[in-house]
Amino acid sequence: MGFSKNQGGIMGVSLNGSVSSIKNVTIATTSIGEPDWSYIPTAGKSGKSKEEFMSEIRELAKKAAMAGSKSESEQLSIKVTQLRAEYLSEVAPDRKGLYQHAKNQMKNQNGNPKCKGTGELTLLDFLEAAKGRESSLAEKRFALSGGGILTCPMLTGGGYGAEIEYQGVKVLSNTGYGWGYELTPAELARKDEFYAIYWKEYRAVKNDVEDELAQLPDYLGDRPAFDRKA
């Protein structure tokens, strides 16, 4: 039950599932319909020092600035998104724990349904199983560990979605496009730190390349094919 298709203004890169963005929400879903934690920040220290993070961010920025094709740029963009999730996880809420608790809550609503062929049931599978049994499911609020709240809005196409709110922020949700998340104030500040490092290095490399090209003799600057053949 993966919602990995590009719809409604979503643009992204297809992987095993999907990674994309719509407005200020990042969408990251595996092919079996679970949140893809490779792209979604969740509490847990990475073990990397600030210096190691800065080195990795700068290295990706250098590669992005020097990328020679759209395909290479897209692959680097994926790596940037993964590294950003790891960087934000230093201050992120426990989205993974909240998601698991939400699954347990829905499992308790439905008894003990059997696992599907591809493995453990997802939260949306449990919500689908509740269809018809809990006519007022959309009106309920389920308390989760750590102060989180799960609500299950009815979708226009039928069935239920899921929204997990924590400290006033929808930290994890799926309303038909895949699993997405909004950032907490602490994560937004750390995201700004991440991109300040990234774009400073990116622009520096771009400027160096432009300076080098400007210094080429006219016949080399006008005829790049000559340089390739040489």
Image (spheres, rainbow, N blue to C red):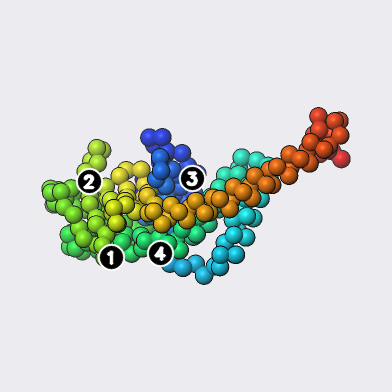
Q: Point out the image quarter for the C terminus.
A: top right
Q: Amino acid at mark 3?
A: Ser
Q: Going from the N terminus, do you reach mark 1 or mark 3 first? A: 3
The residue under label 4 is 43
The residue under label 3 is 14
Q: Is residue 155 visible?
A: yes
Q: Going from the N terminus, do you reach mark 3 or mark 2 first? A: 3
> Viewed as shown, does residue 157 lie left or right of 135?
right
Residue 138 vs residue 196, the one in the foreground = 196
Q: Is residue 32 visible?
A: no
Task: Give the Cα separation between the discs numbered 2 and 1.
Answer: 22 Å
The residue under label 1 is 146
- At x 78%, y 41%, the residue is 212
- Per the image, label 2 sits on a secondary structure element best described as loop
Q: Quadrant of residue 96?
A: bottom left
The residue under label 2 is 153
- Per the image, label 1 sits on a secondary structure element best described as helix
